Image: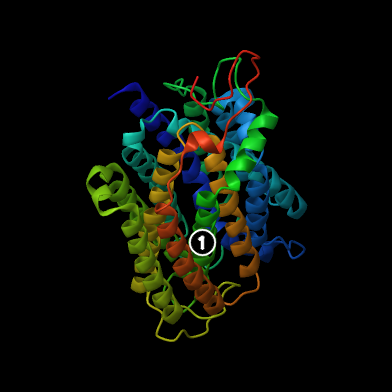
Amino acid sequence: MDKGYLNVWFLSVAFMLLFTGFQCLGIIMKTILEGFKLENVNFYADGYLCMALIYISFAIANWFAPSVISLIGPKITMIVGDICYMGYMACFLYPIEIVLYIISVILGIGAALIWTAQGNYLVINTPKEKMPRNSGVFWAMLQLSMIFGNTLIFFLFAGQESIGSKVRILVVFILLGIMGFSLLVFIFLPRSVRHDAISSDAEEKPGPIEVLKGAGTLFKTKHILILCVTFIYSGLELAFFSGVYVSCVGFTLKLPNSKRLIGLTGIFIGIGEVIGGITFGILGAYTAKIGRSTIVIFGLILHVLSFALIFINLPNNSPFGNTSDDAIISSSPVIAVACGFTLGLGDACFNTQFYTALGSTYQNNSASAFAIFKFIQNVGAFAGFLYSTHLILYGNLILLTGFALLGTICFIIAEKIEVNEDEVIKYKMKSKNQEPSNSAK
């Protein structure tokens, strides 16, 4: 195992531990806050609104994250981001409405830092020809967090009609402990095997203002603009499967033991994500032969099938709270869990190809490329959580289907565009003797 590949594994383990906590919290947030409201009548915080605030501040902060990386490097940037996630988790020991909303904004900033730095660290430890393998390793390891976290929920939520303080505090303490180990891994994360124009250790590198301008230049290219439509869809479906859908399952009282089913559905979302990461990432040398566009089309088919089954299996008002309403068919826990699996597998189809496409195309400007990806994706996630506070389930599913079709078409078009990275961004380096270049230092 070469040093760069080993570094990718360290990175993957750190993210798996961190998001065992956060992805689990995202899935149960709406449910535990509704339980807290039953004990505190003057508490009105909404889980969907918290997530919306996270993603809009995440989106805005993405523009500045490459500049931070240029100043302190990807490793320290990820450590700062990890601390923001742990602070957010701690707030759920005793939720206070205004504090939750403020810390949601802070977490969004930390998320922008950690995810942009992650994309940068992944690329500068990965040869171009190994991007499918390494991005697949990262994605599969990251999504193991869905399985671990939701297994915990499956057992702790058994027999619970609502989530009281005792269960909430126990869950938060366990998840905080797991996230603490992620911070240790980030602290001891090895140095990268190479640097690019942004994360160079040399003095002759672009300053934070130049990096910000470079990201703006990249954002205006034809290739990125077309991909942005696909990135928006990835944000909308992220909001749906990571927060809205599992809440709908938990609120559907016609499903047996619906609160426990949240955990089981989350586990199968994670299984789908891991299988997708292995199939289209780690085994990318084989699946790459069918092309990135074909894999994205397969993801589209899986998602449209999922939306159709959810449409008939869950009641229309299930996003908003406990409901005993009937669905079009008798609500089935098997269909609910199966849709979790297909949502996760389809999401992996999209995201592994995004990582491979960006990492292969923008080897020396990965921080800017991934910042733009996360910016657009999180604008989509913000919109998804925001409209889900009022939009009925059927409207949500119809909107998702339309964007899935449009996003897939745009990805196919973008794949046919030739990109010369050297002609996109030419930084003015600090050294007077240094010619403008974007080559790695």
Quadrant location, the N terminus = top left
Residue at 37%, 25% in the rendered image: 4
Residue at 62%, 41% in the rendered image: 217
**Taking 201 as reference, is 62 above or below it?**
below
Q: Which residue is tagged 1?
A: 233
Residue 43 visible to an observer of this rendering: yes
Where residue 421 appears, x then y in whole percent? 48, 37
**Taking 329 as reference, is 294 above or below it?**
above
Q: Secondary structure at mark 1?
A: helix
Where residue 20 appears, x then y in whole percent? 46, 45
292 with respect to 61 (left or right): left
Q: Nearer the viewer, residue 438 or 6?
A: 438
Residue at 36%, 38% in the rendered image: 131
Residue type at tag 1: Tyr
Where residue 260 appears, x then y in whole percent? 44, 63
Residue lying at the far top of the rendered structure: 433
Q: Nearer the viewer, residue 229 or 269?
A: 229
Q: Quadrant of residue 135?
A: top left
Where residue 437 appears, x then y in whole percent? 55, 25
Q: Quadrant of residue 106?
A: top right
Disc 1 crowd, CA 10 A, few/some/many (<14, 14-19, 20+): many
Residue at 41%, 77% in the rendered image: 308
Q: Quadrant of residue 356?
A: top left
- Number of numbered labels in the structure image: 1
147 with respect to 326 (left or right): left
**Taking 429 as reference, is 253 above or below it?**
below
